[in-house]
Amino acid sequence: MSACGCESTAYYGPNLHEACPGANFIVFMSLVDAVVRSLCDVSQVCERVTPRTVPELEYDFIVIGTGAGGATAAGRLAEEARWKILVLEAGPETPVGMNLPVMNHPFDSGQDIHWGITSDFNKPSIVDWGYKTEPESVACQGFPDKRCSYFRPKVVGGSTTITGSYLRGLPRDYDEWEAMGNKGWGYKDVLPFFKRSENNTEMEKRNLDPAFHGTNGPLTIESYGWEPPIHQDFLDVAKSQGYAVSVDLNDATKGTGFSRMQGNVRHGVRQSAAAAFLHPHRDNPNLHLMVNSTVTKLTFEDHDQVSGVEFTYQGQTHRVKATKEVILAAGPINTPHLLMVSGVGPKEELEKVGIKVIHELEGVGKNLTDHVSLGLIYDMIALGLHFNGMNINNVNRYKNGREGVFSAPGMRPITARVNSSQTDASDPDLLFMFLGFIPKCGRTGSPQEFFDPEHPDDPNDFRISPTVINPKSRGHVSLNSSNPLDKPLVTGNYLTVEHDQKLLLEGIRMVNKYVLTSDVFKAKYGLALKKGIYGDCDQKHEHDSDEYWICAMKHETLIAQHLTSSCRMGPSSDKFAVVNQQLQVHGLKNLRIADESVFPKTISSDPWATTMMIGERAAEFVKEKHGN
């Protein structure tokens, strides 16, 4: 990439056509991929940390994972020139295509890359862990083997490579954490660490309150370069129906209602946690990154002191020592799994697969929590024929100005945080998540190519997903075998508590009322609820009855991919707590966890911004202990 002013022989795959389901996409999507790779600011070829192929024998710190928590913690620790840090990522470097904001779910092995409802369930992918739940008793009944599917990015940057909006939890979320025995984790305590990460470029443009935003952090937060014309109507209709419309849901005084959100994007290019926190250390000799490196075990000096890690790279096993600490940030499935295969976890769980118990810790893998939802799809009949936005005109618009469809994740920046009848406006319990105006893989690149050539008469459509943000159902992560390379067993237990079904049902009715009773939506877009998409629910139940929607949510369950709390933080008196208030694993020395698995309970937003805050705090705790 000498054209970008640097030399790099790395291939940042996979190619965009590999995210598409057939050979007829190869020619045009390979052209799109070539164009994107030629754009230096998009490929980031001169910014990336060059991965190593051989580790040193010893480091001060080893960080496992490069997502919102791991990349943040590693980047902050690398600011200390006297410390040497090894960062281990199981997946490859970030594919260039994932830097396009429009690519919100590319290379997914479990869900359609655009709608995320049902697709080829077994399509392999090198950048997705490919996790599925065990057969569910209530949810996901319409999916193969009744198993819900997760998209857990296995790539440098983790889940921050597919984000759509920058949204924090409400102050009450963090105050509840503190009330659970986690002193120093209330909203007033965590706010400075949110601000520390943030470089918000639109303080004046959006009239944002500096009390709640930072402008000097490494993570750029700004508006996307394009939005569908229906966005303003979403806000106007919400206001006409009595909903609050907020300029900033991250403002503690304006945290409820409908809003047009900002994202982790910089001049039309997605900025992952790795881009924000690791790329600045490209030329820093004290930070070493290894990709395609799967950690298989934590090593111990004795029963209570972690001494390093064992990992595999290109078929070889490496053992590396951490003289100060190991920071585990592998995510809410892999973090508890790695602990258990290393001998840390519930005694019964370890012994059933023949793992020697090094440290018994009952809460490892327990309390897994996710937001649960149902996709409601609305046809926009008045807009006429539905053409695919993946065309040469939009390629050129993005190439020449980082504008247009490719510069935004469709409708995802529109977000609503609202309350049901079970609470009041100050205590929202539902999210409305919007998705639409996302192009599909293109065959020809023609602006006249139909969105679905096999069904050219299908109208434009979009999805709104009412989402339960305070579910009572809890799942768990358990062991399939003692082999660390075998996938763990994940039990979601979605919708197993009646509270979650009732609240989701009310959310469904709220969204349908919002959409279907609006004269604006009828006149401009001819909106109509798409029917016949929830299995045999139409045959079993009267349409729009409570029984119909209960059937629909059980058949086509939409899980929000907001997994948290499988190694929750809490005092030692909490039998299910895994880490203390400094994120140190209870009863072990030299081991911290810095990802969303430590959330004491889930929050009223997606977890990634809060996980970045966790990474900031983990680094701060380390610096306080080992000398700033």
Image: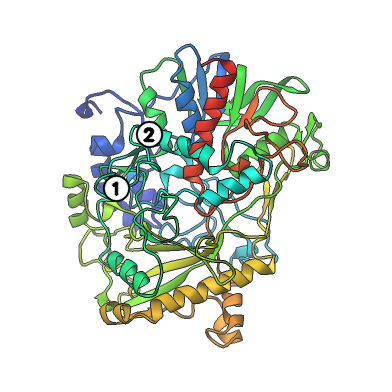
Q: Is residue 590 left or right of residue 104?
A: right
Question: In the image, what residue type sits under mark 2?
Answer: Ala
Q: Is residue 101 left or right of residue 431?
A: left
Could you tell me residue 570's position as x and y percent? 69, 39
Depth order, front residue of 139/519: 519
For marks 2 and 1 on the same chain, the one whose residue lies earlier in the sequence: 1
The answer to whether residue 126 is visible is no
User: At x 45% / y 59%, what residue is drawn?
Assistant: 256
The answer to whether residue 124 is visible is yes
Depth order, front residue of 564/87: 564
Sort mark 1 into few (<14), some (14-19) or many (20+) by Cα contacts within 10 Å: some
User: At x 62% / y 60%, what residue is drawn?
Assistant: 471
The correct choice, above or below, for 110 with respect to 329 in the image is below
Among the 4 quarters of the image, the one containing residue 449: bottom left
Could you tell me residue 609's position as x and y percent? 46, 43
Q: Do the residues labelled 2 and 1 touch (CB within 8 Å)?
A: no
Sort mark 2 into few (<14), some (14-19) or many (20+) by Cα contacts within 10 Å: many
Question: In the image, what residue type sits under mark 1?
Answer: Ser
Q: Distance from label 2 to label 1 (Cα)?
A: 24 Å
Depth order, front residue of 394/66: 66
Q: Read off the residue under disc 1.
A: 30
Name the colour scheme.
rainbow
Q: In this view, does 504 lie to the left or right of 300?
A: left
Could you tell me residue 477's position as x and y percent? 69, 47
The correct choice, above or below, for 553 with respect to 220 in the image is below
Depth order, front residue of 250/38: 250
Nearer mark to the viewer, of 2 and 1: 2
Q: Read off the residue under disc 2.
A: 275
Which structural element holds mark 1? helix
